[in-house]
Image (cartoon, coloured by chain):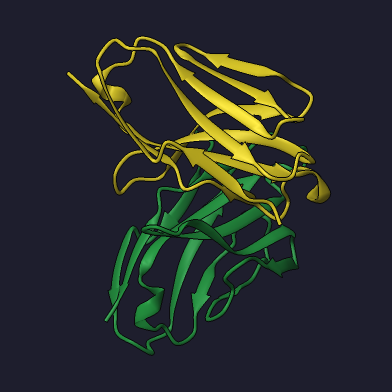
């Protein structure tokens, strides 16, 4: 069964720094990997989706990379801002279900605080 | 606007009183799922559906029921809620082509 781990569990950095959040998964037979943002008590907002054939995706100040063979993904946030403070979740869709028909396996998230 | 809509957003109920949380998506997605989120345990899948009349258990299905009579709707039913079902619930949908999941805003359920 797929297991997804996110390190660190919590991170606090000053505004303006570039930072990297890590996600690792145990089964490399994935269909895709999705990064989400969750604000306290709120729903999940999709940030980036990487298909298994892709190496990275970019959206604004965010860049996500995928290395299937090593079972790792990183989310890079450039020039962090206080508004980036949230919990960031990594989720994997398994190959066996052809795109995650049986849903996603989530990590427990990285709680990020950007200090003004 | 493409979205997944859950209702209600907040619900407080008593043990044993049947309830239904509704979920509807307007993207013509084939796949729909229900998750619960608990502190320290993260998001865990309850049930999922690959299409109309096709549903299957996720990781934590005990105490829940679902149905998929129409493509757009995927209600979550708690026949006899118990306090250990107090949680934050999310519905999500995705197309069969695997272009990522869209989540609803969540339903915070408290069972007393």
Quarter holding residue A85: top left
Q: Is residue B91 visible?
A: yes
Q: Residue at x 56, y 79 (%)?
A: B62
Q: Residue at x 52, y 46 (%)?
A: A107
Could you tell me which quadrant the C terminus of chain B lies in? bottom left
Give chain B's shade: green
| Residue B45 picture location, percent across and down | 58, 60
Q: Residue furthest left?
A: A116
Q: Residue at x 79, y 24 (%)?
A: A53
Query: Foreground: B68 or A97?
Result: A97
Q: Is residue B105 positioned above or below A12 on the image?
A: below
| Residue A12 picture location, percent across and down | 27, 28
Q: Is B10 left or right of A61, judged from the image as shown?
A: left
Query: Foreground: A8 or A97?
Result: A8
Q: Is residue B24 positioned above or below B101 on the image?
A: below
Q: Is B66 left or right of A6, judged from the image as shown?
A: right
| Residue A89 picture location, percent across and down | 48, 39
Q: Residue at x 59, y 73 (%)?
A: B61
Give chain A's shade: yellow
| Residue A46 picture location, percent across and down | 51, 33
Query: Foreground: A9 or A63?
Result: A9
């Amino acid at each position: 069964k797929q297991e997804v781990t996110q390190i660190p569990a919590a991170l606090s950095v000053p505004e303006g720094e570039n930072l990297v959040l890590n996600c690792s998964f145990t089964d490399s037979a994935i269909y895709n990997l999705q990064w989400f943002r969750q604000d306290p008590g709120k729903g999940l907002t999709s940030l980036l989706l990487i298909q298994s054939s892709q190496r990275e995706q970019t959206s604004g100040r965010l860049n996500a990379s995928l290395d299937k063979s090593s079972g790792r993904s990183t989310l890079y946030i450039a020039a962090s801002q206080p508004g980036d403070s949230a919990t960031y979740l990594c989720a994997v869709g398994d190959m066996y279900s052809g795109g995650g028909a049986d849903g996603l396996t989530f990590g427990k998230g990285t709680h990020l605080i950007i200090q003004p | 606007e493409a979205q997944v809509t859950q209702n209600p957003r907040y619900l407080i109920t008593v043990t044993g009183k049947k309830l239904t949380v509704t979920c509807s998506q307007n993207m013509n997605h084939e796949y729909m799922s229900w998750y619960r989120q608990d502190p320290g345990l993260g998001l865990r899948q309850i049930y999922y559906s690959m299409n109309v009349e096709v549903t299957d258990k996720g990781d934590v299905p005990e105490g829940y029921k679902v149905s998929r009579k129409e493509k757009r709707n995927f209600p979550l039913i708690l026949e006899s809620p118990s306090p250990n079902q107090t949680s934050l619930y999310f519905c999500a949908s995705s197309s069969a082509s695997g272009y990522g999941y869209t989540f609803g805003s969540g339903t915070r359920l408290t069972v007393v």
